[in-house]
Image (tube, rainbow, N blue to C red):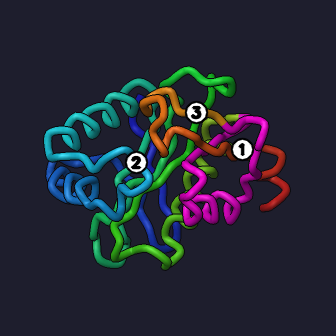
Amino acid sequence: MPPIETHSPRLLLRAWRDADLPVFAALNADAEVMRHFPAPLDAAQSAQLLARIRAHFEAYGYGFWALERRDTGELIGVTGLAQVGFDAPFVPAVEIGWRLARAHWRQGYASEAARAALAVAFERLGLEQVVSFTVPANLPSQAVMRAIGMQRDESGDFRHPRVPDGHPLQPHVLYRIRRAQWEARR
């Protein structure tokens, strides 16, 4: 299946190129960008993550896209959709997520890209629901979730199974949006 690509007024959500790896690695090595994750990633870990992202695209035709500014061609982060790859009460599910370089925070890029990703989820893939999750302290990501129409599902909050027991980042909050909610907002 050829990978799906999409765009928004200011952004291109595209397939990854080999030349993207250094920018992706720098993004994942930034301690501030990664503050709500257990640790920043080194270059080898970023390369492994990018290989997993590309494998997801090959398997499903969608995934976490390279997020590029249309006006400059600059790679500014990652946004997209993926099958949730761990066991939790809400799985099976498709998640939406984003990670942007600090220079591009607070400019509406995350919400704009996430809306484009949701359009793919509901209009092209025919999904009935998309979830998102983060640690309780990640208020900026929760603000994006609300901005794109997601609603908190407190009964779905969980302890992330890939974060060690007792780690302060293990508790996660869960947000959901259903196709009907998406369509009502359009």
Which residue type carries mark 2? Phe
Gap between marks 1 and 3 measured at Cα: 17 Å
Gap between marks 1 and 2 measured at Cα: 21 Å
Quarter of the image with the C terminus in it: bottom right
The residue carrying mark 1 is 176
Q: Which residue is drawn at 41% across and 24% down?
A: 59
* Helix, strand or loop status at disc 2: loop
Gap between marks 3 and 2 measured at Cα: 13 Å
First in sequence, mark 3 or 2: give its number. 2
First in sequence, mark 1 or 2: give its number. 2
Up-down relation of residue 171 to residue 25 (above or below): above
Q: Of residues 57 and 129, which is closer to you in this image?
A: 129
The residue carrying mark 2 is 37
Q: Of residues 20 and 140, which is closer to you in this image?
A: 140
Which residue type carries mark 1? Arg
Residue 104 is situated, as x and y percent measured from the top left of the image, at 39, 74
First in sequence, mark 1 or 3: give its number. 3
Residue 101: name its quadrant.
bottom left
Residue 39 left/right relative to 89: left
Count of marks overlaid on the render: 3
Q: Which residue is drawn at 27% across and 70% down?
A: 74
Residues in magenta, as a range: 128-157
The residue carrying mark 3 is 159
Up-down relation of residue 179 to residue 119 (above or below): above
Residue 51: name its quadrant.
top left
